[in-house]
Amino acid sequence: KAGVTQTPRYLIKTRGQQVTLSCSPISGHRSVSWYQQTPGQGLQFLFEYFSETQRNKGNFPGRFSGRQFSNSRSEMNVSTLELGDSALYLCASSPTSGDTGELFFGEGSRLTVL
Amino acid sequence: GEDVEQSLFLSVREGDSSVINCTYTDSSSTYLYWYKQEPGAGLQLLTYIFSNMDMKQDQRLTVLLNKKDKHLSLRIADTQTGDSAIYFCAWKDNTDKLIFGTGTRLQVFP
């Protein structure tokens, strides 16, 4: 069974631009969560989607948004990029929400904002 | 609160035991977890412990939970170079989202 796939793996943007990151969960998984990982802040929860509905949201500004499609694939978008948005963005999927809590992570999309 | 604190760095000799500690401030989680992140990779679940347990052993891994002190630890016996990674404790908050600790970078030297 294929793992969680994130694209692109690496990207460079400039301040003010916007970016869209994609995540394909493990087949059969309906929950997708997004995390931002930085050296200073560690792993910060962005949002979780389950059956195309945002189920949970972290403390990020409205520039960060996401969505989930009917095939469970998810995208996140960051508009008006700032230098501080440079980070590794990790996507994780799980079979359902509210179970033992195991998340299956992708390798991440590393965003550099210049 | 949602703070989960871990020591930043741990260095051990190959073959020795490693102990990684985690102190949390909210004990509402049903499960507590340990995740491992190898260089250039995402996180993978190592093990988890049910909140009404004190200890769980899984091959070289031993998890200890002290709910009174809100302290979780992971012991790795016979540490190998392949164990070099960042280790995160994690738990679910009352909104069911997974919160991660600050991470401990384990370095194993020969």
Image (spheres, coloured by chain):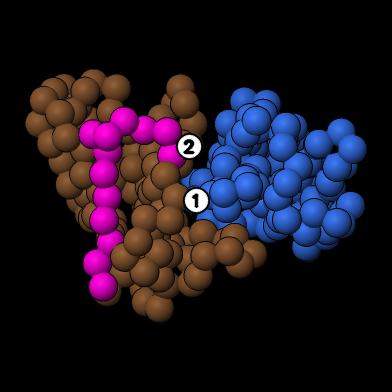
Chain colours: A brown, B blue
Give the prevailing secondary structure in the magenta stretch: loop
Q: Quote the CA–CA distance across marks 1 and 2.
A: 11 Å
Q: As drawn, is B69 to the left or to the right of B91?
A: right
Report the front residue among B57 and A76: A76
Mark 1 burial class by Cα count in 10 Å: few <14, some 14-19, many 20+? many
- In the rendered view of the protein, which quadrant contains the N terminus of chain A? bottom left
To which quarter of the image does residue B39 belong? top left
Q: As drawn, is B74 to the left or to the right of A49?
A: right
Residue A40 position (above or below residue A25): above
Hey, what amino acid is under mark 1? Leu
Q: As drawn, is B15 to the left or to the right of A71?
A: right
Helix, strand or loop for disc 2: strand
- Residue B46 x/y as whole percent: 64, 56
Residue B2 position (above or below residue B30): above
For the residues beneath circles 1 and 2, the answer to whether they share a chain is no
Provide the residue designation for mark 1: B43
Hey, what amino acid is under mark 2? Leu
- Residue B107 x/y as whole percent: 61, 34
Helix, strand or loop for disc 1: strand
Dot 2 falls on which chain?
Answer: A
Provide the residue designation for mark 2: A43
Instruction: Tell me, yes or no, whether the two marked residues, 1 and 2, touch with CB atoms within 8 Å.
Output: yes
Q: As drawn, is B98 to the left or to the right of B49?
A: left
Residue B14 position (above or below residue A96): above
Q: Evaluate whether residue A45 shows in this view.
A: yes
Magenta residues, as a range?
A58-70
Residue B99 in the magenta stretch? The answer is no
Dot 1 falls on which chain?
Answer: B
- Residue B5 x/y as whole percent: 67, 29
